[in-house]
Image (cartoon, rainbow, N blue to C red):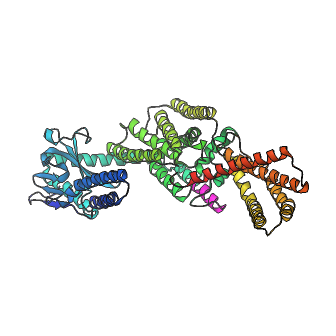
Amino acid sequence: MVDSTEAYSREFHASWRSSTGRVTVVVIVIALLLSAFGLLGPHRPLSWLLLAGAALMYWFAWILSRQILGKKPALRVGPRGIRANVLKDRKPSWSDIADVREESVQGHTHIVLSLAPGAAAALQGSRLSGNKRELRIPLGAIRKKDQADAVQAVVEGFQRYGGTQAKKAAEAYIEELLAEADFELRLSKMTPVTWALYLMVALNVGVWLANVLSGVSAFKPLPSDLLRWGANSAASVVEDHQYWRLLSATFLHAGVLHIALNMLGLWEAGKQLNRLYGNAQFLIIYFASALVGSALSLHFSAQQAVSVGASGAVFGVLGALLTAMYRHRGRIPGTMSKNVMSSQLVFLVYALGQGFAKEGIDNAAHVGGLLAGSLLAWLLAGKMDETQGLRRRQVTVMAGLLIPAAAVAGLVLTTPEPRVHHRQLFEFHAGMARILPDLQAAEKALQADGKAASTGKLTTAQFVQAIETRHLPAYRKVESALAPLDVPPNDRAAPLVQDIKRGNTLLVAMMQIEVTRANNPGQVDPVLEAKFKAMGDELKLIKARSTERDQAKKPGK
């Protein structure tokens, strides 16, 4: 205990160099920019909207800046208790406090005061503020380097003036530490080496390194490369019956940042879950979550884009850990369970929110993996559950294998008709890349001769001869190369593919008619002329559709 004979008082003031101060400055800058654009902008409806946004930002900046501009300290610790700006009129004395702890949520430090049973009702929080038996003091307005001192000051003040309650809290804290140490010792004996976690991380990193060494981009791999390595695709799984992609896709990643984030999440949640359930059951949870996530993706993301990543398995491990903490809360020390639940639950909500808000994230795999992992954690017997006999454990393991397998089979069988056929589409793109130089050269040569004929540099006879001897053979060569390239009629890219092939065919036919005209001067075939005009009109429509597609690809469209 700390010597309480000498009065103890500490003050901590808000600062512009704190996280709250920096946010305030950013909000003010945004407000100034919105004001400038609103006042100077030519479009009045938009200007009023910008000015309204600026007013909202100014109001928000004023709320934040009041914590920094006020003369009172942001936090004061003294013999009578704790005073903090964020608590407003609530001024807890030491007799109102049963315990003090530090809590960090997404890097933001809070001091949490647990209220004693006899604490004044005015101190209790509202339903909106969370637990009514706790007071939370965020330290965002205090400089980062001073926050540890602020926490220590509150703890030391509680030790000096908390009396019996401080003594009980210290005893409870020591008891909790001993319980955690005993629990950790039991887990380490049950699962001495978490080799299953190491194996999964090694496999993921090993596959990524193999990708890079084979020439796949380390930062932004092409979808065609990922598909070649085993990415998930509804068309490839359902129509080409390549069911192995449901698993292989979970060991592929779309760049170094993607795999780094997934492996970090897997390591943080996996090291605890692996010890709680053992290596064999950890692998069941991991692979079942990965497969269910991939199978659910067939109904969503994998319909249009190739899908890769271990995130389905990672979400499954995370969901399993949270479920295990709740299910076995009587066997796991309270502080450990609460710390895991608070930190991992915040991350889970944030990650799912990002998945729903941003494009390009396969949230279906996340949700599928999360549901599978949570279910298995509830079904399987963890290492700490000693009430289940061998027979019961065998039954739960069998159920843990059969239920995910049935879910995967059901999801695969009910997959809607794919909207994009990635294998054929990538083959078409690769073929076009090979043909494109010849096609561009043919177009350039035809345009040059057409311009020469229109300016009189080439006579009509010379132009027709050029068509017959140079341009027709070049376009027929392209036509032959395009013939085997195709995608299914229901593919989203089918209209573009059909237009490319049809446009080349029309050019060949029209040039052939030009040659026929030249070889039969003075003869007019009405049927041939009508056919030539119809083909010209069709070619104009194809060019118009091509222009519309190009316009649609531009930003803002």
State left or right for residue 237 relative to residue 31: right
Predominant SS along the magenta part: helix
* Residue at (44% x, 42% y) in the render: 321
Verify whether residue 442 appears in magenta. no
* Residue at (45% x, 46% y) in the render: 357
* Residue at (16% x, 60% y) in the render: 11
Determine which quarter of the picture holds residue 47. Answer: bottom left
Q: Where in the figure is residue 496, as x and y percent of width and height?
A: 67, 48
Q: Residue furthest front?
A: 522
Residue 450 visible, this orientation? yes
Verify whether residue 211 appears in magenta. yes
Tell me the quarter of the image containing the N terminus. bottom left
Determine which quarter of the picture holds residue 147. Answer: bottom left
Q: Where in the figure is residue 60, as x and y percent of width and height?
A: 26, 53
Q: Is residue 77 above or below residue 95?
A: below
* Residue at (23% x, 63% y) in the render: 15
Q: Nearer the viewer, residue 241 or 399?
A: 241
State left or right for residue 6 relative to residue 300: left
Q: Residue furthest bottom?
A: 457
Q: Where in the figure is residue 221, as x and y percent of width and height?
A: 60, 57
Residues drawn in magenta: 203-215
Determine which quarter of the picture holds residue 141. Answer: bottom left
Residue 243 visible, this orientation? no
